[in-house]
Amino acid sequence: MWRMSERKHILVTGGAGFIGSHLVERLLLGGKRVVVIDDLSTGSRENLRTFASHPALEFIHAKICDCPRLAELAAEAEFIFHLAATVGVELVVKSALHVLEASFHETQLLLQAAVVNHTPLLLTSTSEVYGKSQKPAFSEEDDLLIGPPGQSRWSYACSKLTDEFLALAYAREKGLPVIIARLFNTVGPRQTGRYGMVLPRFIASARAGEPLKVFGDGAQTRCFCLVTDVVEALVRLQATPAARGEIFNIGGTEEVSMLELARRVVATLESRSAIELIPYDQAYAPGFDDMRRRKPLVEKLERCVGFHPQTTLRDIIRITAG
C-alpha cells in the first residue's frame, strides 16, 4: 500500500524523462508528494507507468512556459528539481535554435516562480560546459573553454552555462537557495538511443546483430554513471543545506574509450556484431567537434554528501542491457 507524506510536494520538471522518472520513483518511495511538469517532447508517460496510479503523484502535460499553475506549484513546493532540457548531442546539433530559446526562457520562468517563497531549487547542468578543455579530469572550479559559435555542437553547453549563471545570480542577488549539478554521462534502464546516446545505441545494435558504429577514431574516452547512482546524489544534495549555492560534478570515474566500450558491450551480450568506425562528418555535420576526454573529479560531492558513484562499468552495461 502506498505511503503518502503530509509534507508539501516536490516539483520535478522533466519528470517523465530518463533521469527524471527514476528520480520521481525514488521520491515517491521515500514518502514524498511529487508534481511532474513535462511536455513529453523527449520524455514518455511510459517511464512513469509503474507509479501512474500513485496517489502522491500528479502529472501535468505542459511546457514550463505554458503551465498555468507554475507560480503556485513552485512557490508552494518543498523543493524543485529542474531537469527539463533537450537531450542528446544529435538532437542538439539539429535543433540549436530551440535549445537556446527554450532553455533560458523556461529556466528564467521557473526561477522567478521559485523566488516568491525562496523555494530551494536544484538545476541539472551538464559536463558539456567544460567544452574543449584538454585537462585529464574536470573540477567544478576549472575555467571553461567553449567552442566557436559557428558550430551548433556547442549551443547546448552555452545554454546550460547561461542557466547556471542565471541561477547563481538569483542566489546572490535574491537569496534563492540554488544547487547546480553538472551531470556527466548517465546511463541505465529506460534510456533511449534515438537521440545519439551511445550505450543504449551500442546495446540495441549488439542485440540485433548489427554493426556497432563508433564515431571518429574511437579513442575518445568517457566515464559512465548508473542513473540510480545519479539519483542518489541528487537526493542527498537536496537534503544537504551546505550544498546550496554550490556546483557539483556527478558522474562515474572509470574511464573507457568508445572503441573499448563497443567491445565490452559485444562481449557482455555475447553478440557476433562487428564494430565499425564512422567519420564524424558522416555521423554529424561537417566540422563537428568533440571532447577527447570527459572525466569528472567528484571529491567535492563526496565531501559534501558522503557519496561517490561506484557501480562498475561491467555492471552498468549489464544493468542497462536488462
Image: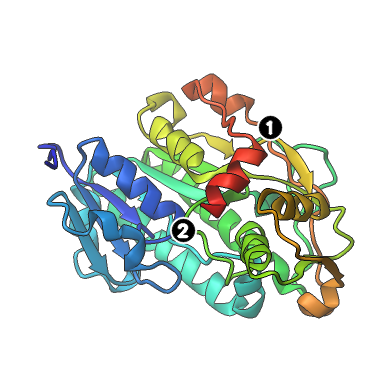
Task: Kindly state the secondary structure of the residue where label 1 is placed.
Answer: loop
Which residue was labeled with disc 2? 190
For label 2, the SS is loop
Local packing at callout 1 (Cα closer than 10 Å; few below 14, some 14-19, many 20+) is: some
Q: Is residue 124 left or right of residue 255?
A: left
Coordinates of residue 63 in the picture (x, y in percent):
34, 71
Residue drawn at x 84%, y 77% as measured from the top left: 281
Viewer-nearest residue: 218 or 101: 218
Residue 25 shows in the view: yes
The residue depicted at 29 percent of the width and 74 percent of the height is: 66
Quadrant for the N terminus, please.
top left
Q: Is residue 281 above or below residue 168?
A: below
Could you say which quadrant of the image residue 61 lies in? Answer: bottom left
| Rendered image: mark on residue 2 | none
The kind of residue on which mark 1 rests is Leu
Front-lying residue, 50 or 237: 50
Q: Is residue 88 left or right of residue 80?
A: right
Q: Amino acid at mark 2?
A: Arg
To which residue does mark 1 refer?
297
The answer for how far apart the CA atoms under marks 1 and 2 are is 26 Å
